[in-house]
Each structure stands twice: as structure tokens, then as C-alpha cells.
Amino acid sequence: MWLAARPNALNAPRLGMVVGKRLLRRAVDRNRAKRVIRESFRQAAELPTMDIVVRLVEPGARIARADAERLFSALTDLLAERAERSCVR
């Protein structure tokens, strides 16, 4: 999975997804991947107000809920680390 994030001026984080037909041929698989990513986004605690875009890049990859949860927890950790670095200066 590929992830991009950018701050927004809203009061809540937003999610965008790119799940192409080239990567997952069957609509059932594309919809399942989107469902898993969307639910993990909802369950992710303490996401800052950002626009987050998730893109699948591996053809035929199965997306497990644990993978998506790790993605958003890694994003939260990365943003916290960056905030700490900017405060230390």
C-alpha cells in the first residue's frame, strides 16, 4: 500500500482510496479492500485533521484488516515523531 497525507483546514480527517481494476480484477475484491481500509480508518484513534490517500500498488494483493490497522497506526506514530522533532528545535 502507498500512503500520502496532507493537512486540511477541517475539523476531521478525510480518507481517499485508489483501488484500481488492474490490481484487483473482481469488483468483490476491490469492494472488500475498500471496506477493510475504511473500517480501519474509522477505528484509528487520534488521527490529526488531514487528508489521507491510500493507494493499492500490489497486483492481486489481499488486504487484511491487520494490514490496514498497521498502516494507520504507523501514520499516527510517524506524525507524533515529527511533532516531537519540530518541538525539540
Image: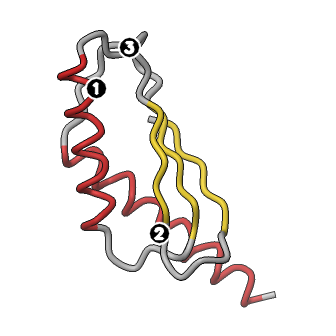
Kindly state the secondary structure of the residue where label 1 is placed. Answer: helix
Q: Is residue 13 left or right of residue 4?
A: left
Q: Are marks 2 and 1 in contact (CB under 8 Å)?
A: no
Label 3 or label 1, whichever lies nearer to me, is: 1
Q: 46 above or below 7?
A: below
- Give the alpha-carbon distance from disc 3 to disc 2, as whole Å: 27 Å
The answer to which quarter of the image holds residue 46 is: bottom left
Screen quadrant of the N terminus: top left
Q: Are marks 3 and 2 in contact (CB under 8 Å)?
A: no
Q: Locate residue 44, reporting x and y percent.
A: 31, 68
The answer to which quarter of the image holds residue 60 is: top left
Which residue, given by chain and number where applicable, does mark 3 sit on?
59
Which residue, given by chain and number where applicable, does mark 2 sit on?
77
Say which amino acid is labelled 3.
Pro
Which of the two discs, 3 and 1, labels the residue nearer the N terminus? 1
Which of the two discs, 2 and 1, labels the residue nearer the N terminus? 1
Say which amino acid is labelled 2.
Asp
